Image: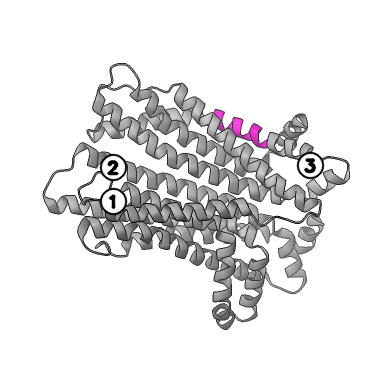
Amino acid sequence: MFALALRSVRLRPGRLLATLLSAFLGAAIIMTFNSLHDTAGAPGVDHVSADTLTTAASVVGGYGTLLVFFAVASTLTVNVRQRTDEITLLRHTGATPAQIKRMIVGESVIVALAGSALAVGPAMLGGNALLDVFKDSGQVADGVSYVFGPVALMSGVAITLLASAGAAFLAVRRATRAAAGMRQGRGGARKFAAWAALAVGTAGVLCAFAMKPTDAALMAAPAYGAILLSIGFALLSPALLHRFLGRAEPLLTTLTGASGYLTVRNMRQRADELSGVLMPLILFTGMATATLYMQAVESDAIKASGVAKSVGDKNLETLNFVVVGIIVVFACVMLVNTLYAATSYRAGEFGRQRLAGATPGQVLGTVGLESLVLTVTGVFFGTVAGLAGIVPFTAVRTDSLLPGQGLGIWLTVVAMAAMATLVTSLGTARRTLRVRAVDAVAVVA
């Protein structure tokens, strides 16, 4: 089956392009920051520089590992779901579920290896540039030389392979059960992980109230708590979408009539598929909002105290901005990959709608309304997770409940999320509608 997987990748490379892009960016980020471990462990590096580099590699490397798994998992889930007919045909021709799993997991491993190999060069350039940033801000001595060693290479390859193989195995397991007509489970493991993340995240944000305003780790507890809350909401996204649609249905029906009613019904049927879009939206909104506001509050508090920023303060500020940059890149990649794959796969659905009398403009309007609902849902729960971290930190650090920076940061985050969602979904749908309705239905059939 591995040989069949190799032929499948070679003959249809475009199908796995989204997965390759996620694996490439994920491996590049992991290698970039883990190369700081190699640099910190090189001979002649002073203690302060080594601590700065190790902290950056550990903190951002952890974020990167988490985001890599979500990015690869979301794209692989959409990819495997679109191959249900192929999996069913393989089952009918005698292939066992184990053979199909080995084939698709083998494809994912091949793509992950290719993405890791392509990421080595950009990771070396990125790590060198990141080291220069630390040098320019005075956090690392000028004499420290960049080193790209085994820690960066092995961690990048290993994490990308594990994320790809694990996500592919879980996705194909569900797809083979569906192809065989077996009843799907209720996602007990996913629910357990989601509630565990919510519980630990809540404990993390509450820990801030037990700290002093001057504690060095004050920002860490609510920041990690907000991240875990975002992850919990992301894992519960299908159920959250169902509940949100139930609340929003009367308003959508009143404002848009029959199209709103049909949109709600369609989204309820596709809640599991659309959860792949909600995941990056919730993660991006929650993590970016919490990190940016807490850093702004910290910077203003230091400025108000009249004390110059220490090396540790500069290091923390650099880490926060780098983390937000990673989140922006990965969230956009996850959104674009998932939305492009999910929307382009709906060519047959769009064709049937047009044959039934819908105009291209009406189809685009439905897609736009779906994207708007997804954006509002993702932004809402992401904002809740972000606020859960911001409020405790601000209350302890400044004795006020909310930060004094206003809504500017939040509006910027929301605008970026909405733009990525609407532009990708509408652009892909518009391109899909260029195919004649009869041809689109014929291809699917």
- Which element is circle 1 on? helix
- Which element is circle 3 on? helix
Q: Is residue 32 magenta?
A: no
Q: Earlier in the sequence, mark 2 or mark 3?
A: 3
Tell me residue 55's x, y (percent).
33, 34
Amino acid beneath label 1: Gln
Circle 1 is placed at which residue position?
Answer: 295
Looking at this view, name the residue that lies furthest to the left. 306
Task: Please identify the dominant SS of the magenta region.
Answer: helix
Circle 3 is placed at which residue position?
Answer: 97
- Which element is circle 2 on? helix
Tell me residue 381's x, y (percent).
46, 63
Q: Residue at x 27, y 39 (%)?
A: 315
Label 1 and label 3: CA atoms lie apart by 49 Å
How many residues crowd around disc 2 within 10 Å: few (fewer than 14), some, or many (20 or more)? many
417 displayed left or right of 103 = left
Q: Residues in magenta? A: 107-117
22 displayed left or right of 439 = left
Circle 2 is placed at which residue position?
Answer: 316
Amino acid beneath label 3: Pro
Q: Are marks 1 and 2 in contact (CB under 8 Å)?
A: yes
Q: Residue at x 58, y 74 (%)?
A: 246
Q: Earlier in the sequence, mark 1 or mark 3?
A: 3
Q: Foreground residue, 402 or 252?
A: 402
Q: Foreground residue, 376 or 390?
A: 390
Looking at this view, name the residue that lies furthest to the front. 210
